[in-house]
């Protein structure tokens, strides 16, 4: 993609997602996430009506007079966008690929955070960390993130969510609002998600295509695994083959739901042919 086409595409996404974030999401994002973090401000003398749970017993013992800890809301938050850019994200049976929907969702979230003067960072991952952009503020920073989401070419086509979550935990020492976007057709990330979710507010946004849910009966079909590049002939007329595929798909979906629920993280499921706007708004309002 040449520079002119890239800038045109970035601008198109900015216009669409900026409108959504300005008119719909910034208020919902603010309500859902603002004021969750509390930071220590000062110690002062106890006043009638203060919560006794906030008494600082060390200071009280030192001065022989009750003192309380005062906390204030953290006004500035950090949003981390974690995006799966492995081979399976380039699948799509309708007008859009999963990757394109993920880019739009990520851009909408980023502009919503910008409206609230928050920092935004990006982690692009496959089975390795493909790109890390540290959190910063501002429109030009968000446009750089969108540019990378559109044109970045991964070195690997495979997926390793556990690796990405370990990287998040090692780089983000303060609490962050994390949106993890993938089709979640992997497992073995329960432990690392549990650790990351203790510190961060994590939401898994699963973007999928209707054609991935069931294997159609098309007879003998040559298929390519998007993540391994392996070509194979599959007999889709076989009921056993179709049932095995559906079981595999359902197992991965159940693992995703159960793992996120156990860790206390949120989930959003959106199909490429559905309105992700409705799904995200519904999620924010339910928090």
Image: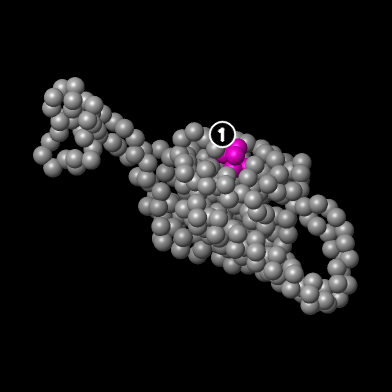
Label 1: how many Cα within 10 Å (few below 14, some 14–19, many 20+):
few
Quarter of the image that includes the N terminus:
top right
- From this view, report whether residue 192 is shown above or below residue 242: above
- Residue 36, horizontal then vertical, whole percent: 37, 45
- Residue 12, horizontal then vertical, whole percent: 62, 52
Range covered by the magenta-colored residues: 164-168
Left or right of residue 220, residue 247 in this image: left
What residue is pinned by disc 1?
170
Q: Evaluate whether residue 211 shows in this view.
A: no
- Residue 60, horizontal then vertical, whole percent: 18, 27
- From this view, report whether residue 139 is shown above or below residue 97: above
Compare residues 274 and 67 and report the one nearer the observer.
Answer: 67
Seen at 51% across and 63% down, the residue is 279
| Element type where label 1 sits in the image | helix
Quarter of the image that includes the C terminus:
bottom left
- Residue 131, horizontal then vertical, whole percent: 66, 38
Seen at 77% across and 52% down, the residue is 227
Seen at 37% across and 41% down, the residue is 37
Q: Would you say residue 276 sits in the magenta stretch?
A: no
């Amino acid at each position: 993609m040449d520079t002119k086409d890239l800038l045109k595409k970035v601008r198109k996404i900015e216009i669409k997602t900026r409108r959504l974030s300005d008119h719909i999401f910034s208020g919902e994002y603010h309500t859902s996430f603002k004021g969750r973090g509390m930071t220590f401000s000062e110690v002062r003398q106890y006043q009638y009506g203060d919560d006794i749970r906030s008494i600082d017993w060390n200071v009280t013992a030192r001065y022989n007079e009750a003192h309380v800890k005062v906390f204030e809301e953290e006004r500035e938050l950090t949003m981390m966008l974690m995006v799966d850019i492995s081979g399976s994200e380039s699948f799509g049976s309708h007008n859009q690929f999963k990757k394109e929907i993920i880019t739009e969702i990520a851009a909408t979230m980023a502009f919503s955070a910008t409206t609230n003067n928050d920092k935004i960072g990006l982690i692009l991952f496959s089975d390795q960390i493909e790109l890390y952009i540290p959190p910063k503020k501002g429109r030009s920073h968000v446009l750089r993130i969108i540019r990378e989401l559109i044109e970045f070419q991964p070195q690997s086509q495979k997926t390793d969510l556990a690796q990405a979550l370990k990287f998040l935990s090692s780089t983000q020492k303060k609490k962050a609002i994390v949106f993890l976007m993938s089709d979640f057709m992997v497992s073995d990330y329960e432990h690392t998600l549990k650790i990351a979710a203790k510190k961060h507010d994590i939401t898994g946004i699963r973007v999928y295509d209707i054609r991935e849910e069931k294997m159609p009966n098309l007879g003998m079909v040559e298929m390519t695994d998007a993540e391994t590049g392996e070509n194979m002939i599959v007999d889709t007329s076989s009921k056993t083959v179709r049932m095995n595929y559906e079981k595999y798909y359902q197992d991965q979906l159940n693992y995703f739901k159960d793992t996120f629920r156990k860790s206390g993280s949120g989930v959003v499921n959106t199909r490429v042919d559905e309105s992700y706007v409705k799904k995200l708004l519904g999620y924010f309002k339910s928090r």
